[in-house]
Image (spheres, rainbow, N blue to C red):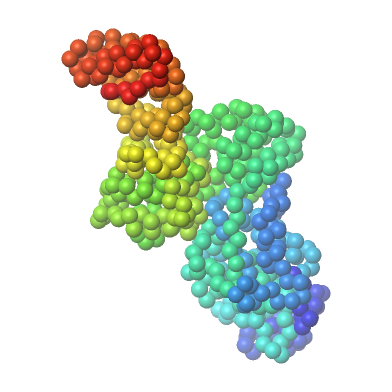
Amino acid sequence: MTGDRDHVDFRGSEIYGPVLGKGTQNNYYGTSRVPVTLPHLVGVIPPRAGCFQDRAEAARLVATLAAGGTTVVSSAGGVLAGGVLAGMGGVGKTQLAADYARSAWQAGEVDVLVWITAGNATEAASGYAQAGMEILGAEPERAAQAFLASLEPGPRERSWRWLVVLDDVADPADLNGLWPPASPHGRTLVTTRRKDAALTNEGRRLIEVGLFTEAEAVDYLTAALAARDRTEPAGQLAALAAELGYLPLALSQAAAYLIDTGVDCADYRGVLADRATKLADTGPDALPDEQTHTAAAAWTVSIERANSLMPAGLARPLLQLTAFLDPNGIPDTVLTSRPALAHLTTATGRGQVTPAEVRRALRALYRLSLIDHTPTTPHQAVRVHQLIQRAVRDTLTPDQHDQIARTAADALLVAWPGIENDTALAQALRANSAALTAHAENTLLLPVAHDVLFRVGGSLGEAGQVTAARDYFHHLTRTTISRLGPDHPDTLSTRNSLGHWRGVAGDPEGAAAAYADLLEDRLRVLGPDHPDTLATRHNLDDGQRRAEEGGEGGESVD
């Protein structure tokens, strides 16, 4: 920041109160004091993280807060009061703010820089009070408001260039009465996980801080390991970055784990892939860069706050349900389906939960940066970072895990249309079913296979992906044989589906052979008069006829 033409450069000068002149008694602040030499820093700017990555957000922040000798004007025409860096825990908001503040300080662009960790209203007020006492000599009880008043000097008072950073604001209400003024002489920078409308006005702009790009993530891992004379194959680092969802906090802790333990990247990826291992157990013993929490604990407070917002008590169980589904997009009809509403009603222990309340709880989770919520894309309305999902699942008891997984399966099945006219919705439902199966396959198979497992394969075939449908049922057949046994009714049903899609995929001889083997087993297990046995006999006759004619398989019966 540079001053405007009315600004006086105070660097190296002494001030008493709000620029009253040397030796002047300041009756408002109640004291005269030893002079303060400008520039002056209040608070401590967090140290630069190791292997700090320049990011697009940093350039956006500089552009937003730039003031090249003139007043910066927002699109609404008012004085730009500052920027709000918002994003999920672990994306590096504080580091971006610190980099901006440090650069402004070192370049001599500010006379007063105040860094406040503003986790609540008391912390924010205390930070202002400290600034008021250090810079103005104000009495403690008046210091906070005195400092805020000094940031907007009167017409006959000289001004200084200032930057106020309010780091980690947890609740917009905490800043009521504590926002620095919109001023051509200074800027305010806020970091927060919140996205509430109350944080922005015509003079404050929201800058959403996202994840690293793939290139930034790989560059970071490469540099962090190289600093300790470690190298890993670029392909392994790229895969690790993807598995951590490009989250800066998780990447830094992963690099520290590799360095501290001496394991290579491939072995560490194996640790991450082990679903029996909790996310908290994949981090280093000593956190890097003066971090105060692990990746696993990064979102605990945010979840608590979201759960306290209206409708109270609904955000947490709703987030738990999303933790089993596709992180890249969950249809809104799944989360507002009858099984989902019944589960959420039981989980909250209050009256019947409605679809409107679910949507309001989704907005609460969005406001805390725990999900992305885009109602305008209903088939992918909700996105959740994969590590948030894992951290949430890690908190569940085995019974809770199984119950929520079954609810998710029921919800998917209810949301699935009988006739798939909407290919985008069908694809989204298949993707969500795949994610659910990856997290809870045993639950979906025991004691019987859930119908959603069969619906996925049928959907692939209906979409014209007959080879994929055949391969899907081939995998499911092997899985059911392993988990349920070769004579379980669901294993036999899966084999029937496999035979059908083998025929449709252009292998009528293979389909006929599969039906012949299945008929033998169903006769043995179920007897000759069981409906499934009779259906298999029909399918075999049809399959043999088509094999002789060289045609594809027809409709199977089961």
Viewer-side residue, 84 vs 372: 372
Q: How many numbered circles are shown?
A: 0
- Check the image and report above or below for 60 versus 181: above
Q: Can residue 51 be seen in this view?
A: yes
Q: Which of 522 and 448 is in front in this view?
A: 522
Camera-side residue of 214 and 505:
505
- Considering only vertical position in the picture, is 251 above or below 39? above
Q: Which of 62 and 151 is in front in this view?
A: 62
Quadrant in the picture for the N terminus: bottom right
**Residue 235 placement (x, y as % from top left):** 67, 31
**Coordinates of residue 543 in the picture (x, y in percent):** 34, 15
In this image, 325 relative to 385: left or right? left
- Quarter residue 409 falls in: top left
Identify the image quadrant of residue 365.
Answer: bottom left
Residue at 43% x, 58% y is 364
Q: In this view, does 557 lie to the left or right of 269?
A: left
Give the x, y percent position of residue 315.
39, 53
Q: Residue at x 54, y 63 (%)?
A: 169
- Please tell me which residue is depicted at 68% across the width and 42% down the height of the picture: 215
The residue that appears at 79% across and 65% down in the rendered structure is 107
Furthest-left residue in this view: 529
The outermost residue toward the right is 12
Q: In which quarter of the image is the C terminus?
A: top left
Location of residue 80 (image quadrant)? bottom right
**Residue 437 higher or lower than 511, as above or below:** below
Q: Where is residue 120 in the image (x, y as percent from the top left)?
A: 51, 65
The reply to whether residue 296 is in sight is: no
